[in-house]
Image: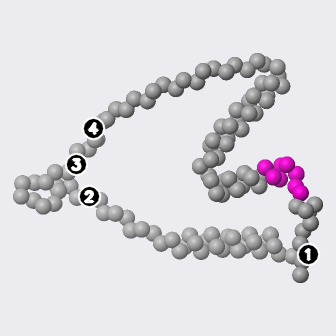
Amino acid sequence: MMPLPTPAALVGSPFQWVTLALLIVVIFAPSLVPRLGRQAGRLLRAALLRRLGIPQSHPQTTRPKAEAQVLPPEHPAPTLRAGAKQPIQQRPARLRPTAVWPRVVLVAAAATVLLWYLLHPR
């Protein structure tokens, strides 16, 4: 039986903690990545300007109001002939949904190989 790690063994460098936090965000909340990138860019730009001694300007960010335009459809909807029950143009046949199991097998195989490589005693 392996001994439990001591708290001193769990201490990492700040870079390791930031990397771990980014991996968690990318895995569990990928929609936050663009927001975090913009915020990090602003912070880095502000720090660089402060180091160079360039005064920072804070412009008023007023966004123009969005105007909505309703455009007519590019292709008119198919119409019915007199007395017909089906439209003149037939809808294209839908593609058959693909099976999910090949992707699951591929991901499981890749995860197995990576775990074996990482956890295999040398």
At label 3, counting other C-alpha atoms closer than 10 Å, the crowd grade (few under 14, some 14-19, many 20 or more) is few
Provide the secondary structure element on which disc 4 rests: loop
Mark 1 vs mark 4: give the one in front: 1
Quadrant location of the C terminus in the rendered image:
bottom right
Provide the secondary structure element on which disc 2 rests: loop
Image position of 46 with respect to 38: above or below: above
Q: How is the image coloured?
A: one colour
- Residue under circle 2? 91
Region rendered in magenta: 11-18
- Could you tell me how far apart the alpha carbons at marks 3 and 1 are, in whole angstroms? 71 Å
**How far across and how far down the image is residue 95, in percent?**
37, 64
- Residue under circle 1? 3
Question: What amino acid is at disc 2?
Answer: Arg
Image position of 76 with respect to 109: above or below: above
Q: Is residue 122 visible?
A: no
Q: Nearer the viewer, residue 57 or 80?
A: 57
Provide the secondary structure element on which disc 1 rests: loop
